[in-house]
Image (tube, grey):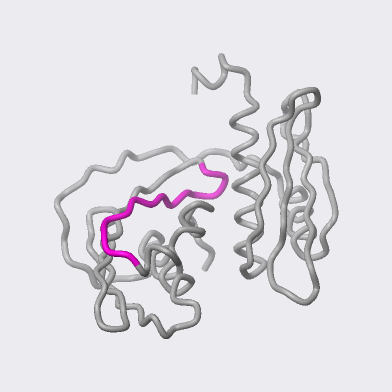
Amino acid sequence: MSNLFTLSDSSLRSLAAQLHLNGKFNHTCRSAYGRRVLQLTMQVEQGAGEAAVLIEIGGERHRITISHREPRGDVNLADFIEAIANGRIDSAEPAPARTLPALPELEPLLDTAQQQALRDLVRKGGFLDVHIGLEHPVKVAVHRTHNTQGITALLALGESQPRTTAWTLRQQPEKCFRALMESVEYLAAAGQPKTARNAA
């Protein structure tokens, strides 16, 4: 079953550090192409060699304990959060009632062929111009190494003063693909004319 909601890039990057801190942290789960958003809070309390984590999202509370001896505890926590956001975890304590707005389903930003082209970039590396109805395409370059998992991506939109984003993500190909899609959507939103952004 595919995820409707996934953690944002910034949340994925910060989970590892936050697992070793005490405090409350805010995170965001986005739907495909970032069209819908779920806000969540994460309360972390340090114990003897482990972190007790309380997740509050969508009117529910969920708890998980992550051992600091786990080599990829942040990945397990990310999977747990995304499972909650996508309704795959049933047991939860009721949290104070919260009203989430019902948003209409929007058309995907990229068609099937464009999505497949991005998947191929994640798998092989290379570059691609993604045409999304703006004056200029989103230029995407992906570098991957064969001895480590993950990619380095550089995206740009525009010519004389392009908007750019660059990042490296050491994750499985599907997570890299979702991060790449989110970056394309981010640049697409930033590149819309101001009047279109204000009307949205």
Position of residue 149 measured from the top left corner of the image (x, y, whole percent): 69, 72
Residue 59 forms part of the magenta stretch: no
In-front residue for pair 130/11: 11
Q: Which residue is at the front of the view, 43 or 132?
A: 43
- The image quadrant that residue 174 belongs to is bottom right
76, above or below 96, in the image: below
Residue found at x 46% / y 58%: 14
Q: Is residue 73 visible?
A: yes
Residue 167 placed where, x, y %? 65, 52
Q: How many marks?
A: 0
Residue 138 as seen in the image, left or right of residue 97:
right
> Residue visible at 77% across and 35% down?
131
Segment colored magenta: 21-34
Q: Residue furthest top?
A: 195
Q: Is residue 18 above or below residue 66?
A: above
Figure check: 123 above or below 73: above
Q: Is residue 37 left or right of residue 100?
A: right
Position of 121 with respect to 104 (left or right) is right
Q: Is residue 5 visible?
A: no
Q: Main secondary structure of the magenta part?
A: strand
Q: Nearer the viewer, residue 103 or 131?
A: 131
Report x, y in % for residue 9: 53, 53
From the viewer's perspective, is residue 160 above or below residue 171?
above
Residue name at image x 44 percent, y 38 percent: 104
The x and y percentages for residue 54 are 25, 66
The quarter of the picture where residue 136 lies is top right
Q: Residue at x 16, y 61 (%)?
A: 94
